[in-house]
Amino acid sequence: MTTFSNPIQTDIIIIGSGPAGLFAVFEAGLLGLHCHLIDVLAQPGGQLTEIYPKKPIYDIPGFPSILAGELFENLMLQAAPFKPGFTLGERAEIIQSTPQGQFVVITNKGTAHQAPNIAIAGGLGCFEPRKPPIQNIDDFENNGIEYIIKDPEKYRGKRLVIAGGGDSALDWAIFLQPIASEITLIHRRTTFRGHIDSVNKVLTMEKNKHIRILTNSEVIQIKGDTSLQKVGISTEGKESLLWTDCDYFLPLFGLSPKLGPIANWGLHIHKSRIEVNTMDFCSNIPGIFAIGDINHYPGKLKLILCGFHEATLMAQGAFKRINPDTNTVLRYTTVSGIKGF
């Protein structure tokens, strides 16, 4: 057992500070519970700030469209009255139980936290981009090849080749089309996996000659001097490569999740995600909950708005563990208000 001294005391330790974790601060605060968040990233926000801060999101209730970075700022404002604590730039490494029924979470830097509840809201866990198998791809990373789009203005007036068939590739092709000088969208299959509306939009853009789409195709070679200049595209049924001039090649194949230390905590895992009970999203270990993209249950949808719902019920479950003899009474915020607003 790892020894520790003077742990940070709180009601819920939240591992991960993405949208589900931040909204959990608000929901827990309504019940009088205090939260402390741990995140390996240097700033809160998770994927909202680290991967796509300028990407518009369309399925947040009440916001027909909101940039991911703006959603993060709103979530921080919403949580602020409940004064959450943060341990940033540190990875939750070890979980221990105390004889008093508490949990202690110790980070890779030795910071200890203690609480009766843990909510794992680590998104995809420790993630890394899925890279195409191109021999010299490392030579051009951050010099013409990028797997994550943080600042769309970087691509203004540039020639882009985007590879991928899912929502990320489709959404960025749509968003960047008015910004880039030209876009080629490449997919190795004939049909796209993304949302139907997004698929229809890119097909309409192709029909209107706003973008070029190549299916049954993939980038297999790249060339350049000090930076990327060309990509070689292999198309099914054609013997020679199609060489396309470009300033940026964006392989958007998603992220490869890696649970990291979470895999060693005795939790029931299903395909790199934590199995939970949908009553309050508790794991097989009482007092350890999992919310957001990192959990698994029948019918699970990896949507931010689903993470909000999960955070709400998790907070109720955490309250009952701390106050087993107290019945929670649902109070509408329109009636009770929020102290601090």
Image: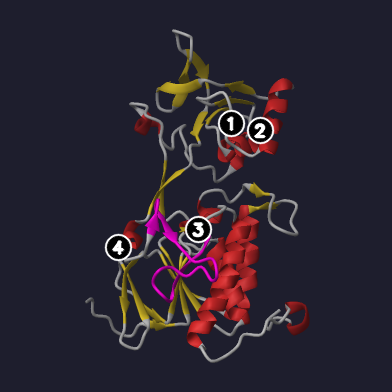
The amino acid marked with disc number 4 is Asn
Q: Which mark is residue 264?
A: 4
Picture coordinates of residue 90 (x, y %)?
Answer: 37, 65
Q: Residues within 10 Å of mark 1 (few under 14, many from 20)?
A: some
Q: Amino acid at mark 3?
A: Tyr
Asked if 308 appears above or below 52 in the picture, the reply is below
Please say if the residues under marks 2 and 3 sit with CB atoms less than 8 Å apart: no
Residue displayed at 68% across by 26% down = 203
Q: State which tag comes first along the sequence, 4 or 2.
A: 2
Asked if the residues shown at circle 1 and circle 2 are in contact, with their CB atoms under 8 angstroms apart, the answer is yes
Other residues around mark 4 within 10 Å, as few (<14) / some (14–19) / many (≥20): few
Residue at numbered disc 2: 199
Label 3 crowding class (10 Å Cα cut-off): few <14, some 14-19, many 20+? some
- Give yes or no for residue 21 being in the magenta stretch: no
* Residue 263 point in image, percent of width and height: 33, 59
Q: CA distance from mark 1 to mark 4?
A: 36 Å
For the magenta stretch, what is the residue range? 269-293
Q: Main secondary structure of the magenta part?
A: loop
